């Protein structure tokens, strides 16, 4: 499993994002190098409102398979179904 801190922004509905806010435990796909990778959003906030930047923890349950793709400064998108719902930048990989 791989964990990292990231600065993320969830698009508003007008920007093509979700119609509802995001919550801790939410599991979108993370897109890196053309790969869609399952991830989990972890935060102490109950709700993450769209249209605001947050510093959050992201968990990749199968991160060890894709570990070579992840480095500080990596930019990625967050996807739900066929839609891009947000974007982010990796701040720090957490060794646990």
Image (cartoon, rainbow, N blue to C red):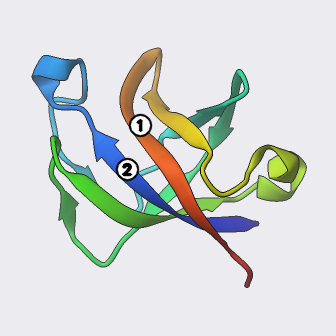
Residue 32 as seen in the image, left or right of residue 9? right
Residue 87 has which mark?
1
| Above or below, comparing residue 80 to residue 39 in the picture | above
Q: Are marks 1 and 2 in contact (CB under 8 Å)?
A: yes
Tag shown at residue 8: 2
The one nearer the camera, 29 or 93, is 93
Instruction: Indicate the position of residue 91 as horizontal and vertical percent values.
Output: 54, 62
Q: On the picture, is 80 further left or further right than 14?
A: right
The quadrant the C terminus occupies is: bottom right
| Residue 71 picture location, percent across and down | 72, 54
Tell me the quarter of the image containing the N terminus.
bottom right
Residue located at (62% from left, 45% from top): 74
6 with respect to 49 (left or right): right
Q: Position of residue 23 (x, y in %)?
A: 28, 58
Label 1's element? strand
For the view shown, which residue lies furthest in the front direction? 73
- State how far apart marks 1 and 2 are (Cα): 6 Å
């Amino acid at each position: 499993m791989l964990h990292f801190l990231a600065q993320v922004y969830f698009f508003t509905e007008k920007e093509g994002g979700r119609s509802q806010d995001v919550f801790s435990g939410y599991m979108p796909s993370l897109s890196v190098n053309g790969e869609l990778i399952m991830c989990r959003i972890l935060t102490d906030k109950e709700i993450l409102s769209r249209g605001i930047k947050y510093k959050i923890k992201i968990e990749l349950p199968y991160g060890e398979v894709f570990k070579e793709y992840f480095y500080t400064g990596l930019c990625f998108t967050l996807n739900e179904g066929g839609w891009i719902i947000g974007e982010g930048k990796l701040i720090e990989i957490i060794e646990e």
